[in-house]
Amino acid sequence: MPRKNDRNTRGRIIAAAWKLFYQNGYDATTVEDIVFESQTSRGSFYHYFQGKDALVGTLAYLFDDKYEQLAKEISPDASAIDTLIWLNHELFVMIEDSVSMELLTRLLATQLTAQGEKHLLDGGRFYFRLLRRIVREGQKNGQLRTDLTESEIVRSYALWERALMYDWCLSGGDYSLVAWTDKMTPTYMKSFAP
């Protein structure tokens, strides 16, 4: 039971922080704001995070929350390729609608300079577990190539998504991330068809 409470408290802090970062900007958001919004305590905050900067990398886990929600909505009739295209579209809609360019840029920058934990590459994340399941089933059902390993396809797909986000940030968001991914991802995913 304590493990669930720990996850809920940590999750509330992360969700509150990202809501405030989006509404007020990263620099204008204080630890006190996050504690108030999450309905936790300073002690709880510092139990999980060394400071506000430690929250930047947690955007990857906010993405996982979205993937957990989307996993429940996956059509059982959709092919593996269609499912991956749909997941990509839905995540990028969330990013365009509720994650500021500044925050996404900060996340990508922290991952480039991180000496320790690289949240985006954490193979234990729900994101990677979901991708492995989709790819494994797709290969078993003849929907995805089998001359590439499950790991190679998952890594390539994750790399594709990070590249799209990185380029969008690098270009200052001068195009729609969703429109671009909707145009290009189906073409990219055809390379994994048998």
Image (cartoon, rainbow, N blue to C red):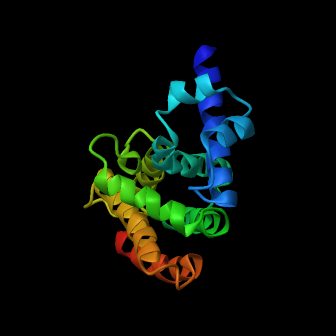
Q: Quadrant of the N terminus?
A: top right
Residue shown at 46% from the left, 41% from the top: 54
Q: Identify which residue is drawn at 47% across, 45% down.
A: 53
- Of residue 186 and residue 174, the one placed in the foreground of this image is 174
Is residue 80 at least partly visible in the picture? no
Report how many numbered discs are placed on residues in the image. Answer: 0
Where is the C terminus found, in terms of image quarters? bottom left
Q: Position of residue 52 (x, y in %)?
A: 52, 43
Vertical relation: 162 (above or below) 3: below
Furthest residue toward top: 1
Left/right of residue 38 with respect to residue 52 in the rendered view: right
Give left or right: position of 16 versus 157.
Answer: right
Q: Nearer the viewer, residue 89 or 165?
A: 165
Counting from the top left corner in percent of width and height, residue 129 is at: 45, 43
Q: Which quarter of the figure has residue 149?
A: bottom left
- The relative height of residue 81 versus residue 76 in the rendered view (above or below) is below
Pick whichever, 70 or 166, lies toward us.
166
Q: Is residue 163 above or below residue 38?
A: below
Residue 188 lies in quadrant: bottom left
> In this view of the protein, which residue sits in the foreground, 35 or 168?
35
Q: Quadrant of residue 96?
A: bottom right
- For the point 73% across and 40% down, the residue is 37
Image location of residue 10, percent across then percent down: 59, 32
Q: Is residue 136 visible?
A: yes
Looking at the image, residue 191 lies above or below residue 83: below
Q: Residue at x 65, y 44 (%)?
A: 15
